[in-house]
Image: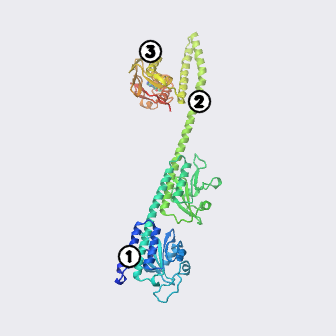
Amino acid sequence: MTAEEAPEAPVAPVGAAGPDEAAPAPALQRLSELVRRVNSSTDTAEVLEEIVHGVCEVLGYGVAAIARLEGDTLVMTAVAGPDDVRRQVLGRRTPAAEILDEFRQADRWGILRFVPHGRMDNARLTAAWIPDFEPDDDPMAWHPEDALYAPLYSATGGLLGNMAVDLPTGNRIPSIHERELLEMFVVQAGLALSNAQQRERLAEQVRLGSTVKEVAQAGSQPGIEAILSDACRAVQRGLGATQVWIRCYPDEDRANGVAAGHPRPSPTGAGVVTLRADLSELWPSADPVVVHISDESCDRLPSSLPKLQQMMTSVGAFQVVVMPMGVALSLLGYVVIGFPGSRGPLRASELDAIAEIARELGRSVHSARLLETEQRLVSELRELDRYKGELITTISHELKTPLTTIIGHAELLGELHEHRSVEAITRNAERLNRLVQNLLDYSRVQDRRAAVRVDVDVIECCRAAIDLVAHLADTGRVGIELVVCCEQVSVSGDPEDLSLVVDNLVSNAVKYTRPGGTVRIEVACDDHEVRVTVRDSGLGISEADQVHLFSAFHRSSNPEALSIPGTGLGLAISRRIVESHGGRIEVESVVGEGSTFTLALPRAPHRTP
Ligand code: ADP
């Protein structure tokens, strides 16, 4: 619409009519009814019907019709008049440009446009409906080729439709007073279309908003295929599209990329269309590109146009919107949405929603890819860990038999000849034997499947551990003290494993305590758990070493501790066992003052997951 076509206020208000030309009572009554209906009814078609019938019945026109603008075409929606005229005119489609052209040649009668006979060109005359009667010579007589229109505008000046009337009362050109009355009906028609437009816009906003939301929700689907397929369905339904295609370009996890289509599946093999050359040039600009089936060139997608038109032909789409999809600087793929020929140009709100949909999808695909990479790495690490465990078990088993033989023979030799070399062989072989045993324990608790659960007396475990280290404690002049809360405290668990944990804590305490030091073992319990505290006055462990203390093969950096033989596996094995019993193991330590290890086990039976 150009400025010259902008709506104007009516020339004169109704009150300006002379006393002899006062608006007839039925006209005002009908009008007030219409005003009420226009403001309250949501059925636009019904209101428009009432308006055209009011114009004929109250103002006496032979024919009245209202056309609504759909895209760039005016579609005749409501017609009042003889049946044969209604049949001929209803549903008629006229390009809006033709009518606007006609308005330019019209006389302005306030908000009405009058095109007197002789001005309309022949093409329009043939297309228009012309009443069949003989013209009169009287200059005030209505001529069959006269046309009286009223363009209907929104409050913001956009063309919404057009009202046309023919065959005025007495077949005479309407007087100013009659025109003013007609204008009042025209204003109501404009309001009805304006209300309808607002309702449609609101409904569209809701529809587009929920489509974007559905696409965002598709992002929570497991896997890119499911995300794309759900998004295709949501977009096709929400935008009333003929076809939707979404494609993700290949990445290191998927050499062929991923694609989805709805209602038809995405092409495969030789049929795959990537559009990558053009989209890489566009990205990271994220504006939708609209392509029509009849376009001969496309500046933004120069090399993709023929492929896009092929895609459109295959599904009967007349226009497509191409929207690159990605995050930050990386182009991940595209969204292509095809629309049928019956629909008009896409509105700005729809193009904005498509851009938002592609942004949502870009984010979802990016997160899904990160998750897939993470899952692949985790399963690779698991496989590596399983292989490591298998290797440790196999090698340890292979070492165990020859070592036992070596130790046996070395002891025999030692009994026969007391020689330093024999002693060294025995000592080192036993050290190796301990390492192998630790390795076997470690891989056993790592790969735990079934769990033994019986009542284990924790105090008994502590006493057995003290017996085990008694010789070492005597030699190292370390005093051991056991303090218990009661006679017997049981937990449910694997007796062999729990003994291994207590033995390890007690032997470490003795091992890493200087002569003259003490080790105090305390057993306490409440209704929920049993706690064994092993406190020593030994070397202590630095804060940095405490961080990795329970990791396999970790030995503290303190040179004095390092000089004491050990494998760095005992605490890793202990933690694994304690956790499989639903308990916890903790350390508090100060270098030079000593360490306190606390083992806490639940009293209720615990099932290994
Ligand atoms: P190992 O004692 O066989 O080396 P552990 O896993 O039992 O293996 O212990 C890991 C490391 O933690 C030890 O090498 C030692 O440096 C340190 N550590 C463990 N217990 C104590 C303790 N009570 N006092 C000081 N250091 C300790």
Under circle 3, the secondary element is helix
In the rendered image, which residue does mark 2 sit on? Answer: 391
Q: Which of marks 1 and 2 is nearer the N terminus?
A: 1
Mark-to-mark CA distance, 1 and 3: 119 Å
Q: What residue type is labelled 2?
A: Leu
Q: Earlier in the sequence, mark 1 or mark 3?
A: 1
Q: What residue type is labelled 1?
A: Leu
Q: Are marks 1 and 2 in contact (CB under 8 Å)?
A: no
Question: Where is residue 144 shown, x and y percent of the image?
Answer: 51, 83
Question: Any atom of ligand 1 within 8 Å of the CB at mark 2?
Answer: no
In the rendered image, which residue does mark 3 sit on? Answer: 474
Q: Which amino acid does label 3 sit on?
A: Asp
Question: Where is residue 178 shown, x and y percent of the image?
Answer: 41, 81
* In the rendered image, the vertical position of residue 495 relative to residue 240, given as above or below: above
* In the rendered image, the vertical position of residue 388 relative to residue 247, given as above or below: above
Residue at x 45% of width, y 26% of height: 558
Q: In this view, does 216 lie to the left or right of 22?
A: right
Q: In this view, does 29 lie to the left or right of 379?
A: left
* In the rendered image, the vertical position of residue 418 relative to residue 375, given as above or below: above
